[in-house]
Amino acid sequence: DIQMTQSPSFLSASLGNSITITCHASQNIKGWLAWYQQKSGNAPELLIYKASSLQSGVPSRFSGSGSGTDYILTISNLQPEDIATYYCQHYQSFPFTFGSGTKLEIK
Amino acid sequence: QVQLQQSGTELVKPASSVKISCKASGYTFTSNYMHWIRQQPGNGLEWIGWIYPGNGNTKYNQKFDGKATLTADKSSSTAYMQLSSLTSEDSAVYFCARSDVGGGFAYWGQGTLVTVSS
């Protein structure tokens, strides 16, 4: 199985600032990576697919980049509604696996 | 609009089985893969497997082989997951989710909480 190592586990940042979350795959996943936002008690929501494609309806403050084994989610101009846990997920091969999550707090 | 409506909370006894449902609407049910994902309390997400309702083909995470069985009823646009030989480790929220051509899960059910307790 491909292991997805996500960091940091916890992040605290101020409104208006930018943050980055990284995801490292144990092997080349060729850009087949998605990012999700999960707010407490809700289902995850797709933010980014194919490493850098913005899902319809998602604010342009969210962006994704990366290739091979290393990927980044960037959130710029942090807003109060960004409080959530963020997950990466590969879909290069079976089984699909998720990162362990990054919990974002607003200072 | 695409909607996935899951069945309600289940409280079940150890060693029993449970079948949860995911009713799809707003799109052609037979044209997209339906996935199931587990989230144990306080934990992250695990992919269980998918079913293609168009032909009933399935693919499982080896970890859930023998634990989960995925089926689909085209007549009612409903996907099902049966979990068997339940233990406390199976207590979790289970989500159904639809994948699209670009990848990723763009549509999710609201989740079904399964609690295994005597």
Image: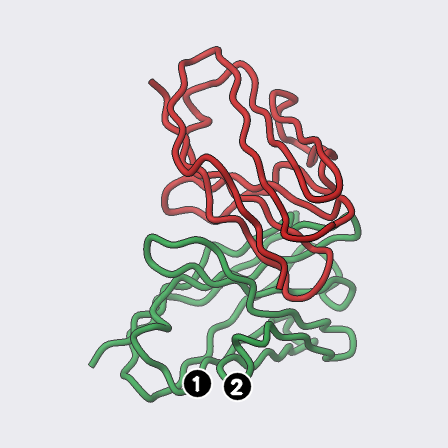
Residue A89: x and y, percent?
Answer: 60, 49
Indicate the position of residue A82 as horizontal and vertical percent values.
Answer: 46, 27
Q: Give A85 or B12, whichever is nearer the viewer.
A: A85
How busy is the neighbourhood of tag 2: few (under 14 within 10 Å), some, or many (20 plus)? Answer: few
Q: Mark 1 points at which residue?
A: B84
Left or right of A63 in this view: A13: left
Report which quarter residue B90 is drawn in.
bottom left
What's the colour of chain B in the image? green
> For numbered disc 2, what is the local secondary structure?
loop
Chain to which the residue tagged by mark 1 belongs? B
How far apart in space, not on screen, are marks 1 and 2 (Cα)?
Answer: 8 Å
Foreground disc of the pair 1, 2: 2
Expressed as whole percent of the image width and height from the top left, the position of residue B59 reads: 68, 75
Q: Is residue B21 left or right of residue A33?
A: left
Q: Given the image, on which type of amino acid does mark 2 rest? A: Gly
User: Which label was assigned to residue B66?
Assistant: 2
Which disc is residue A8 wearing? none
In this rendering, the answer to whether A49 lies above or below B5 is above
Q: Residue furthest left?
A: B118
Front residue of A6/B78: it is A6
Residue drawn at (56%, 81%) of the image: B65
Secondary structure of the residue carrying tag 1 is loop
Dot 1 and dot 2 residues touching (CB under 8 Å) = yes
Picture mark count? 2
Q: Is residue A6 left or right of residue A104?
A: right
Residue at image location 62% in from the left, 24% down from the top: A59
Which chain is red in the rendering?
A: A
